[in-house]
Amino acid sequence: MQHERLGCLSPLALLTTGITVVILIVAYITGGSAMFSPGALNAQAGAEIGGVASHAETGANCASCHPAPWSSETLAGRCMACHTPIQQDNADATSLHGGFLAQDIHSTCRDCHTDHRGPAGELTIIDPLTFPHTATSFDLAAHAQTEQGLPFACIDCHPDSLTGFELQLCTDCHQELDPAYMDGHLLDFGTECLACHDGVDRYTHFDHSQTDFMIDGAHSDPACRDCHSNARTLADLQNTPGECQACHLEQDAHAGKFGAQCGACHSTLAWKPAEFDHDLAAFKLEGKHAEVECAECHSAGYAGTPIECAACHLEDDAHAGQYGVDCGACHTPADWGEATFDHSLSAFPLDGAHVQVECQDCHVNGQYQGTPVECAACHSEPAFHAGMFGGQACSECHSTIAWQPARYDGPHTFPMNHGEGGNTCADCHQPDLTQWTCYTCHDRAGIEGEHREEGIADFSDCLGCHPTGEEGDDD
């Protein structure tokens, strides 16, 4: 019976494979993994670390850097075991390596450092186009190309060491680009370029609108140093005060009387002309006041200017101070002549016919304060009263509506409703109140004739027989 061939799984094939594996393992162990080396190690001597001054001095012992595949160690860990100063850098986020680690950028050594490129090969390989230079606290946004339009190379700024940088390179390079500007810039802000510049800023084309202080109007003219004097760091620039008085205190023509709110009147276009919204003050400008020049009221400054009318109009007071300083009780800012006085607020309210009387009829010669309120002060007692009332009790009979008709509610021996249609005092009292007569209405001749016919000889005392005014009255 013929057996089926096992191919690569034949006893001979398996034996050959096993022998080969054993040979490889022995070669790996005895050769320190050198059989897998991609090339010779760097032989450039540096500071001695772990007894060697270069990778080549490890004697091609791969295991000194490369852990076994089954080991929990890493190549980066082996690097740190020798390069202990880098461990200190990693703990400092402000250092080169620490900055990368903090941002999880290039977290393995081999991202930038490699070997096996020969005894004189480079140990640090960096592509300027992809290298995250921002992690070094200086962005290359403004240094993408040289003045000649060529891409920047690391050696342009780091001629001696990638981990070092001389600030003099900044001034040397930019001095060639614009010597006049740099001369002034160095005088204004010093030579510590990196204290202010991070590679992202706009340099001479800085956009101030990105800050809290907008540059416009006359602020566009001053040089940076005029506001940022003695600034030597970015913090100095950022902490420059934005209040007006920080720069203009010595120019304050108001001597600080208005405080620091310059923008309430002034704009950035120019100090003058200035506009002030007087509605924001305790004294609003209305009527004629809106036409008055500021200096006429603020002759001694602005703060504390009195707002009483008398402060400005005392010399114009036609009342000679009789009404005190409450001018607004009668006058308005519209015009002095358009004065109105609410007489109901005084001791003598106006009503009836008094409302139509001109002010000067009672207030003769402009005399207002102390004007008497008695009727007799304006209305002398008529002769008809014959002094019976003393000129003081007018209101007992008369009203402010009109002098006539008048009413009398006092004692009276004869009915005052005598006759038809009512009576007036003068109907019976002639020629004044001290006398009376019935013959104003009754025919004297007729009365005498009737009484003589009746045998009544004494008919001069009418009330003696007619006390109520009725014809049948007697004693």
Image: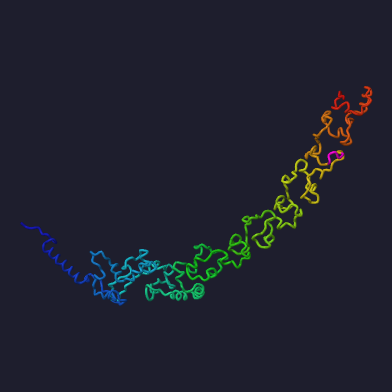
Q: Is residue 240 visible?
A: yes
| Quadrant location, the C terminus | top right
Q: Residue at x 71, y 50 (%)?
A: 329
Image x and y of residue 43, in percent: 28, 76
Instruction: Write the start and end of the magenta stretch as one range.
Output: 386-390
Please give left or right for residue 305 compared with residue 15 in the image. right
Left/right of residue 330 with respect to residue 206 in the rendered view = right
Quadrant, the N terminus: bottom left
Answer left or right for 161 relative to 425. Answer: left
- Pick whichever, 392 or 336, lies toward us: 392
Q: Residue at x 37, y 74 (%)?
A: 161
x, y percentage for residue 312? 71, 58
Foreground residue among 71 and 404: 404
Q: How many marks?
A: 0
Q: Is the magenta stretch mostly helix, strand or loop?
A: loop
Res 38 quadrant in image:
bottom left
> Residue most toward the front?
475
- Measured as percent of width and height from the top left, residue 277 is found at 62, 57
Q: Position of residue 121 (x, y in %)?
A: 30, 74
Q: Which residue does the image show at 70% across and 51% down from the upper left? A: 328
